[in-house]
Image (cartoon, rainbow, N blue to C red):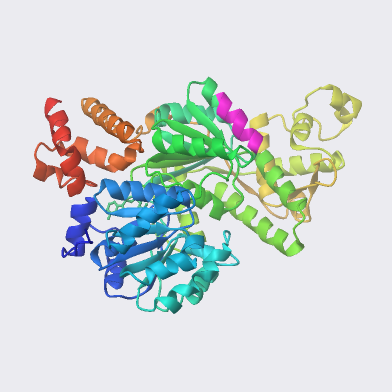
Amino acid sequence: MTKQINTSSPKEALKNIFGYSSFKGKQEVVVMQLLAGKNCLVIMPTGGGKSICYQLPSILRQGTGIIISPLIALMQDQVGSLLQSGVKAAFINSSLAPDEISTIEQQLLKQDLDILYISPERLITNRILHLLQNVPLALFAIDEAHCVSMWGHDFRPEYRKLTILQQRFPNVPRIALTATADKATRQEIQHNLEIGSDPFISSFDRPNIRYQVSEDGSSRQALLDFIKQKHPGETGIVYCLSRAGTERNAEWLQGKGLNALPYHARLSKELRKHTLERFLREEDIIVVATVAFGMGIDKPNVRFVAHLNLPKSIEAYYQETGRAGRDGLPADAWMSYGYQDILMLQRMIESSNADEQRKIVERHKLEGILGYCEVTTCRRQVLLNYFGECLTKSCGNCDICSSPVATWNGSEVAQKALSCIYRTEQRYGVLYLIDVLRAEDNLKIQERNHRELSTYGIGKELSQRQWISVFRQLIVQGFVTVDYTGFGGLKLSLTARTLLRGETTLTLRKDIEPKSWKKQKASIEPDGKDKHLWNTLKKFRYKQAEQQSIPAYFIFNDATLVDLVNKKPTQTKQLLRINGLGQAKVSKYGASLIALIKAH
Ligand code: ADP
Ligand code: ZN
């Protein structure tokens, strides 16, 4: 059967097929642009709703929409989800056998596909190009379009060859999409893919994500408390700096009864694939990973992203935390870091083989993320500012908005710390210096005769934890540097002198004490009597998914679950008003859902 021309308006189709009652952000203008046959570039953050921008016009225009994506997992995911919504979709990539590919090619020739996903390597083969020249095409969508940029973080040579699209298919509109916002990348995409018009840029704000940073030193106990109290039974990602860290922490969390798995680049390909599959399917899974985990993961109901170490830059942090809450429901970005992270990242930069130019950039990025961690104003304002957006009011949904940070005049304690570094000849690390300041009497201090120093015992007024905070801030603010060529001893920088002489004052932040999560609203799960219905519907979803061997969120996502529990529809026409339920899903699952809600 050839593709039926869908004559509904974009808005009707959005509701009937995808179950959404309105467009999100710039979706509508982008859809209209493509329906008018024009090219466009779309820049939206993760979770911004990029897929609708090309899926809907692919369905509404005559011919098949060709979606070029570098990520096999993502193609499979999107096709699986589209099939659930009754859209005729397929993919061609290296995971398919030749006869499977030829079946799909036949479908394409018979014009029986709304949407075809394909990898860039495959697209530029003569066979596929020839095939495409003989069928009507709705559009070309180039997903992850920043891969075209040589200077970007994910350059793929095949993307450069996509210039073939404008040469061979001048009349088929092209849409390029990316979540990478910087101007140079954007211009390179426009130039290479010949997209002349102004890009559609959405705000990078992710208002449903709550940002929180604590300085208590990569505390996995704090992580455990946070997960157990705020996100029990939910999906999350925990990022660590080292591969060993991922294994150690995953094992520790398992020992505490959580469904946690490690993930890093050195694990076998099979194991990584298996972990990714489990991550997509299981509801309570926590993947403890290095940055190797993430590209192309679009599970919508990741409820938290935790960092047990400091990320390398604000860009990395924003991209990683952006994997939380793609469904728009409340989610957490949680971080615990300590001065050891700063030392480790600094050491990585200084000891790498990169040229000086590159090191300057990396130092600058590290300063950026440290600045973010140590701020005393709204975190979202700082983040958006970094991406060139201005948020005039503080957000009300970050740790600092909820409990403002107190500051104190740290000039005097800073002088004590700096003199202690000086008196011990700029050779020792943080913990040893604190022992001297607090008049500990251990063997090392005795051997080095440091009880005789004028700075011995001058800092008893602060606890070890408080001193760690002071040293961390002295490092962050550049008064103290770390000697990586020696044994990591602290040294005074030139600016330290002004502090020592009392020519400048130093304002320090009071670190926030670890707090009880009980006071905050728990996860998205409802309380009271709705909890039973919530669990019943969740079980129903899980069972359906299991029977069809697909992830539960293909059946319906958490936003749909929330809407179902709130509205408790008992008639088909009410079901159609639920967020995320289109006609195909209502005919498939509607009767069962109504029965479950009525029985409740
Ligand atoms: P991106 O590719 O930009 O990261 P997606 O296309 O995966 O974003 O969409 C993110 C989430 O937003 C998905 O869970 C999707 O169901 C939801 N979504 C997209 N468009 C709408 C809309 N118009 N109304 C409600 N939810 C939407
Ligand atoms: Zn805020």
Decide which of 540, 46 is in the foreground and name it.
Answer: 540
Quadrant assignment, res 575:
top left
Q: Is residue 449 visible?
A: yes
Left or right of 47 in this view: 420: right
Classify 452 as above or below 172: above
Decide which of 236, 424 is in the foreground and name it.
Answer: 236
Write down the region rendered in magenta: 243-252
Return the x and y of residue 156 as percentages of the image width and height: 56, 62
Q: Main secondary structure of the magenta part?
A: helix
Classify 41 as above or below 454: below
Left or right of 170 in this view: 375: right
Residue 247 belongs to the span the image colors magenta? yes
Left or right of 136 in this view: 129: right
Return the x and y of residue 147 as percentages of the image width and height: 53, 62
Left or right of 68 in this view: 423: right
Q: Say which residue appears at 21% left-offset and 58% top-offset.
A: 1
Q: Say which residue appears at 76% left-offset and 29% top-offset.
A: 435
Q: Say which residue appears at 28% left-offset and 67% top-offset.
A: 63
Return the x and y of residue 590 as percentages of the image width and height: 16, 39
Please state, as top left, top right, bottom left or bottom right, where the C terminus lies in the image: top left
